[in-house]
Image (cartoon, rainbow, N blue to C red):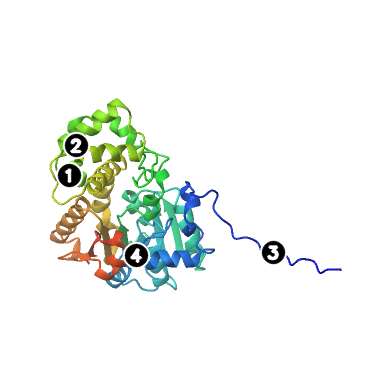
């Protein structure tokens, strides 16, 4: 009698098909516990793993905010929770982190990751909301105000990477761009409501684009011929326009496409309106001596933060503000190219 054949080890799970099309099927990084080596390889190559976000200037932010045990910290843009994780740890024992984000898709995932760290339940308070309303949130949880506050105004990598959100033109997806898909109108609907002058004004205001008028004309004419419903359809129109328009400095056609996408994203989400409200209320969110850190990623944001800090210093609302922006190091830019445009500004609440 022969011995039974040894049981074969289970085969490694493989993707369906030779070239998977689904964003969630395509990347092993969506299962970091199973594919830790693959995630590490992506990170080592200076790229951001799909479905993840790499926090920017963590050490610079912690050094300037100097969170201490027992304090109240606020993360106004929770995202993937990279900064929040460090703030939450720094205020223990006895401190609390108040965290908000408007994204209904990513917020529960991030809260679950932070809860899994094992800190006391009461040390973390999470709300889904736009940061324009942060003052009311802080008053409800910490009437005396917060000790440290962070706002990272950048788009998270999870949003950029997922074509279903409509923020990227690298893969085709619906032309949406809403931070909260449960409210507002997608970018495709916005294009139907804008005239050439409106769109040209937004291209200048939201992305500092030259050739705004002819670019707006080409986009809206194409949209009138056949509604631009997908990200790659819009990108194709913009690239075609770039072939006949004068150069916009040293911007490449892809840079122009990014500027158009940034323009529509800001308009769809009323990002500047929310930021203006946030900055008006910001001094009143903190105790005397409270510290503020704001990360911006384009000139429209940075101008607003710089001017708000300057006026707050003149009015005595801030005791000090950074004279010059803090930029990411060469090492961080090499390790994480998405950090290269980041600017960090710091302010301290007056006594």
Which residue is under mark 1? Answer: 209
Relative vertical location of residue 332 with respect to residue 244 in this rendering, above or below: below
Which residue is under mark 3? Answer: 8
Viewer-proximal residue, 60 or 72? 60
Q: Residue 351 in the image: x percent, y percent?
A: 22, 67
Mark 4 vs mark 3: which is more N-terminal?
3
Q: Assess whether mark 3 and mark 2 are in contact (beta carbons under 8 angstroms).
A: no
Nearest-to-viewer mark from 1 and 3: 3
Which residue is under mark 2? Answer: 215
Give the distance between the C-alpha atoms of the residues marked 4 and 2, in whole angstroms: 34 Å
Nearest-to-viewer mark from 2 and 3: 3
Near mark 1 (Cα within 10 A), the count class, few <14, some 14-19 or many ≥20, is many
59 with respect to 42 (left or right): left
Give the distance between the C-alpha atoms of the residues marked 1 and 4, in whole angstroms: 29 Å
Residue in the image at 29% along x and 73% along y: 63
Residue 128 visible in rendering: yes
Viewer-proximal residue, 133 or 55? 55
Residue in the image at 19% along x and 40% along y: 243
Give the distance between the C-alpha atoms of the residues marked 2 and 3, in whole angstroms: 61 Å
Residue in the image at 38% along x and 50% along y: 159
Q: Residue 153 in the image: x percent, y percent?
A: 30, 55
Mark 4 vs mark 2: which is more N-terminal?
4
Relative vertical location of residue 340 with respect to residue 205 in this rendering, above or below: below
Viewer-proximal residue, 328 or 254? 254
Near mark 2 (Cα within 10 A), the count class, few <14, some 14-19 or many ≥20, is many
Residue 349 visible in rendering: no
Q: Residue 19 in the image: x percent, y percent?
A: 48, 49
């Amino acid at each position: 009698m022969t011995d039974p054949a040894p049981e074969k080890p289970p085969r490694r799970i493989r993707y369906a098909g030779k070239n998977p099309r689904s964003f969630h099927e395509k990347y092993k990084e969506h299962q970091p516990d199973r594919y830790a080596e693959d995630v590490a390889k992506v990170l080592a190559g200076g790229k951001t793993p799909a479905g993840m976000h790499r926090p920017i200037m963590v050490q610079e932010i912690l050094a300037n905010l100097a969170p201490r045990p027992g304090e109240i910290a606020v993360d106004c843009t929770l995202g993937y929770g990279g900064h929040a994780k460090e703030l939450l740890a720094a205020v223990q024992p006895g401190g609390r982190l108040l965290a908000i984000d408007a994204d209904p898709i990513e917020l529960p995932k991030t809260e679950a990751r932070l809860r899994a760290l094992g800190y006391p339940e009461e040390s973390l308070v999470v709300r889904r909301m736009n940061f324009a309303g942060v003052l009311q949130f802080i008053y409800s949880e910490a009437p005396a105000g917060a000790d440290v506050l962070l706002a990272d105004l950048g788009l998270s990598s999870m949003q950029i990477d997922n074509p279903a959100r409509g923020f990227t033109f690298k893969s085709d997806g619906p032309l949406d761009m809403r931070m909260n898909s449960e409210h507002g109108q997608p970018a495709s609907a916005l294009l139907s409501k804008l005239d050439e002058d409106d769109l040209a004004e937004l291209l200048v205001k939201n992305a500092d684009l030259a050739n705004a008028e002819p670019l707006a004309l080409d986009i809206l004419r194409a949209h009138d011929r056949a509604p631009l419903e997908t990200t790659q359809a819009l990108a194709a129109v913009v690239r075609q326009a770039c072939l006949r328009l004068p150069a916009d400095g040293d911007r490449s056609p892809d840079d122009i496409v990014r500027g158009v996408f940034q323009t529509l994203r800001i308009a769809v989400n009323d990002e500047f309106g929310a930021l203006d409200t946030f900055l008006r209320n910001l001094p009143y969110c903190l105790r005397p001596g409270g510290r503020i850190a704001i990360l911006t990623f384009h000139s429209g944001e940075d101008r607003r933060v710089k001017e708000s800090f300057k006026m707050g210093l003149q009015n005595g609302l801030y005791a000090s503000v950074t004279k010059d922006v803090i930029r990411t190091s060469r090492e961080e830019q090499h390790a994480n190219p998405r950090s290269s445009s980041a600017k960090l500004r710091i302010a301290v609440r007056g006594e």
